[in-house]
Amino acid sequence: MAGRGISEDPAILASLVKEIRNHSTLNGLSANFDSVIFYVPETGSEALVNSVHDVISKHGEGMAIAVQPKLAFLKVKGVGLEDTPGIIGRISMKLREKEINIYGMLTLASSILVFVSWDEKEPAMELVKQVIKGGL
């Protein structure tokens, strides 16, 4: 979702999260001043998009909604992962080398969330495992 100052209005964010939870689960969230990205399962996405559109329309700050279907959500977890220098760069480099696009990447303490095309989830998962095990 794009919209001026959209991520700075707690009422909008609360309304959006409520609608998402009514229709789905929230796997991840990324925000900056002019946009908010919600990563949700594709199931029931049409009803969710309509509901989110209604929320954004009521608040007036929203300018656009885009949907990227058929993404896979890979979750990398490990103790001390956040203290491993270059781990995010190695993951993204390995995927780039095999021409696998990263649609989103979030880091949360000892976990990294990577969103790739559903059709490329298996090779992406194997490449990420290689990186985590130390093999480049």
Image: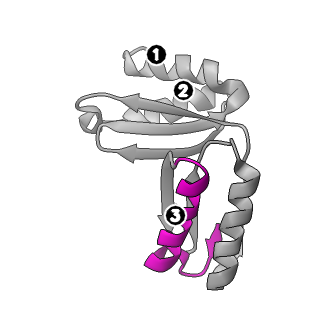
Q: Position of residue 122 (x, y in %)?
A: 62, 19
> Which residue in the protein does label 2 denote?
94
- Residue 107, by quadrant, is top left
Nearest-to-viewer mark from 2 and 1: 1
In the image, is residue 1 above or below residue 90?
below
Q: Disc count in the image? A: 3
What residue range appears in magenta? 1-25
- As helix, strand or loop, the secondary structure at mark 1 comes to helix
* Structure colour scheme: one colour
Q: Indicate which disc, 2 or 1, sits on the residue closer to the N terminus.
A: 2
Do tag 2 and tag 1 residues touch (Cβ < 8 Å)?
yes
Q: Amino acid at mark 1?
A: Gln
Inter-mark Cα distance, 2 to 1: 9 Å
**How packed is label 2: few (under 14 Cα within 10 Å), some, or many (20 or more)?**
some
Do tag 1 and tag 3 residues touch (Cβ < 8 Å)?
no
Q: Main secondary structure of the magenta part?
A: helix
> Which residue in the protein does label 1 denote?
130
User: In front here: 107 or 75?
Assistant: 75
Nearest-to-viewer mark from 3 and 2: 3
Identified at 68% across, 65% down, the residue is 51
Q: Is residue 136 visible?
A: no
Q: Amino acid at mark 2?
A: Lys
Q: Position of residue 22 (x, y in %)?
A: 57, 56
Inter-mark Cα distance, 1 to 3: 38 Å
Q: Amino acid at mark 3?
A: Lys
- As helix, strand or loop, the secondary structure at mark 3 comes to helix
Inter-mark Cα distance, 3 to 2: 36 Å
Drawn side of residue 76 relative to residue 15, left or right: left
Q: Is residue 113 magenta?
A: no
> Which residue in the protein does label 3 denote?
18
